[in-house]
Image: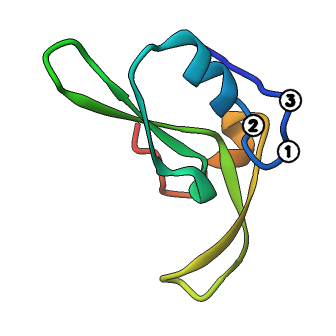
Amino acid sequence: MRVTGTSPHRPGLEKIEELFKRTVPIGIEHGTVGVLARDGTLFEVTTFRRDVETDGRHAVVTFADTIEEDRAPGEISR
């Protein structure tokens, strides 16, 4: 499911919070919100993002619109 939002600071997260009754703000600054299932299982939903600057361990990121922008070489295995 592709979900887009209107806020540049929380792209898509408002829509996730509208679609699911039980959400937890677990990493909003990273574009992540938790969705709680009926059985209490927590699913982390994260927006697409891309590195702007990185030292190999820590990264400064910006939100992206597509998976192609999000994935870095070797990040997604095939």
Of callouts 3 and 2, the N-terminal one? 3
Give the numbered dot on residue 6: 3
| The quarter of the displayed image where residue 23 is located | top left
Q: Secondary structure at mark 3?
A: loop
Give the numbered dot on residue 11: 2
Return the residue found at the far left: 39
Q: Which residue is mark 1?
A: 8
Q: Are marks 3 and 2 in contact (CB under 8 Å)?
A: no
Return the residue found at the far bottom: 55
| Callout 2 amino acid | Pro
Residue 33 as seen in the image, left or right of residue 28: left
Label 3 Cα crowd, 10 Å radius (few <14 / some 14-19 / many 20+)? few
Q: Secondary structure at mark 1?
A: loop
Give the numbered dot on residue 75: none
- How was the colour assigned to the protein in this rendering? rainbow
Cα separation, mark 3 vs mark 2, equals: 6 Å
Q: Secondary structure at mark 2?
A: loop
Q: Are marks 1 and 2 in contact (CB under 8 Å)?
A: yes
